[in-house]
Image: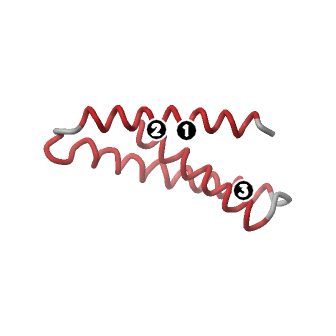
Amino acid sequence: MMGAFSGACLLAMAGAAIASQIYGSFEGAAAMSAGWLGACVGAFGGAGTSLWLILRQGGRHGGTAVVALTGLANMMVVCFAFVAFSG
């Protein structure tokens, strides 16, 4: 769950930033659509990657992966709050 959340947040912010750089700040719809597309792709990719991280090598490093993904998810929430309130 944390991997899917982290992947969605990361790719949504990256997609919106890239679309803003390409189309400029005038075209907000491009940034919104790139953000939504990035969020969907990131959710599926993050879920798959987190399952791989937790279950690889017989689940020996599962706890470490869960802690790292939870920390990453918390950092993404802070980044989203910063972006939301910095305008």
Which residue is at a point 27% across and 49% down the rendered structure image? 52
Residue 33 percent location from the top left of the image: 68, 56
Q: Which residue is mark 3?
A: 31
Which residue is at a point 46% across and 38% down the rendered structure image? 72
Residue placed most toward the observer, 38 or 21: 21
Indicate left or right for 45 with 28 as reference.
left
Q: Residue furthest bottom?
A: 22
Residue 62 percent location from the top left of the image: 24, 36
Q: How is the image coloured?
A: secondary structure
Amino acid type indicated by mark 3: Ala
Cα distance in 3D space between marks 1 and 3? 18 Å
Instruction: Work out whether mark 1 precedes mark 3 in sequence or the reverse, and give the earlier one.
Output: 3
Q: Which residue is mark 2?
A: 72
Residues marked 1 and 2 touching at CB (< 8 Å)? yes
Question: Looking at the image, is 50 positioned above or below residue 82?
Answer: below
Q: Residues within 10 Å of mark 2 (few under 14, many from 20)?
A: some
Identify the secondary structure beneath mark 2.
helix
Q: Which residue is mark 1?
A: 76
